[in-house]
Amino acid sequence: MGVFQFISSGGRCVRYVPLIVVAAYVGISGASAQTLAPNLPDTPTLDIPNIPNLKEYANPKAPENNPFANEPELVLSAKLSEEGQAIPRGLVWRVFSPEAGDDGKLALLATAKGGTTSFHLAPGSYLVHVAFGRAGATKRITMTRAKRSESMILDAGGVKLNAVLSGGGRIPPDQLRFAIYEDHADASGEGPLIIPDVKPDSVVRLNTGTYQIVSNYGTANAVIRADIRVEAGKITEASVEHRAALITMKLVRESGGEALADTAWSVLNTSGDIVRESVGAFASMVLAEGEYDVIAKNKDRIYQRDFKVVAGRNEDVEVVASESASTPAATKQPADGEEPLD
């Protein structure tokens, strides 16, 4: 049965609010409880082992957690040249065993990154290698029971590469890449590749010496080669000049018309060698200064024209799809004794 509570405000009757009285039955008899509970198997008792007290944090530098903490300390620093300052960052240190293992390789014992660093090493002989970019040096060090300090001379410098167009025009950085080779040539006429895909204006650390750089503008034939000299403790800035231009080709029905889709392009140099091929309504590529022939194939017709690339002058080259400039596309003829193709 509902019970109404009378609520008054300022002596006035506001409203009756129904209150629901819920009766809860407690104290269910044992027999009733048995009928409600499912028949579950007995849960076995687990034997929990006693766990010793563990520290929440184990300091790796603490003597009890570092087996080499009581060994003599080797402090290492590196300089680009004899007169230079210690390099504060960017070094990679590696300590090797001087004897090769069963696999013929030296065992790596310890590593560190940064600038000046230290290792705790047992008495004995070690090979220490330090790398700074592509520059590096290795030294054999013998440890005794005394602390030792060593400063390694990298005899290295850096190189920063860039390129411009003829007349000083700017080349978009995303279309310019460099590769660095050793200066002595191999059987292919090129030195071994040291670093590929170097971005412009990035500093590359190299040991002192002469290197060959290759600059690629675009992905066709705009390639410049040059030799550079890297000196210890110095940054060598080198900029090459590309005599090339960006050429965009399109096949049109009339001059100034819309480009025809599904066109296959071939660009040939004066020797008849293919410089670049592509497929699409437009063919854009960077070409070195010179004369070229372009062949455009659309459906069953081939169109051709010659053009000239002037350094630093980007141009659009139109190939007009006229009957006088076209020839039928070559078809493969069946050999003697073969069935003709459908």
Image (cartoon, helix red, strand yellow):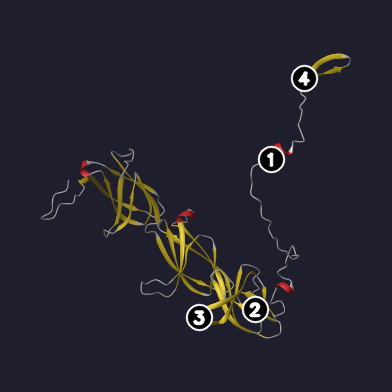
Q: Secondary structure at mark 4?
A: loop
Say which residue appears at 77% left-offset and 19% top-offset.
2
User: Could you say which quadrant of the image residue 111 lies in?
Assistant: bottom right
The crowding category of the residue bearing disc 1, from other C-alpha atoms within 10 Å (few below 14, some 14 to 19, many at least 20), is: few
Between disc 3 and disc 1, whose residue precedes? Answer: 1
| Residue closer to the observer: 300 or 103 | 103
Out of 237 and 173, give the one closest to the viewer.
173
Res 105 label:
none
Q: Nearer the viewer, residue 180 or 161?
A: 180
Q: Is residue 17 above or below residue 220?
A: above
Calculate the distance from the C-alpha at mark 1 to the C-alpha at mark 2: 84 Å
Q: Which residue is mark 1?
A: 34
Q: Residues within 10 Å of mark 2 (few under 14, many from 20)?
A: few
Which of discs 4 and 1 lies nearer the camera? The answer is: 1
Amino acid type at image mark 2: Ser
Q: Quadrant of residue 35?
A: top right
Lower sequence index among marks 1 and 2: 1
Measured as percent of width and height from the top left, residue 291 is found at: 31, 55
Q: Which residue is mark 4?
A: 2
Outermost residue, left side: 337
**Disc 4/disc 3 C-alpha distance (Å):** 92 Å
- Between 124 and 2, the one lying in front of the other is 2
**Which callout, 3 or 2, points to the residue nearer the camera?**
3
Judged by depth in the image, the label closer to the viewer, 3 or 1, is: 1
Identify the residue position indicated by label 2 in the image: 151
Residue that mark 3 sits on: 102
Q: Amino acid at mark 4?
A: Gly
Mark 2 residue element: strand
Q: Is residue 59 rendered to the left or right of residue 260?
A: right
Sequence-first disc among 4 and 1: 4
Question: Would you say residue 170 is visible in this rendering?
Answer: no
Look at discs 4 and 3 and give the one toward the viewer: 4
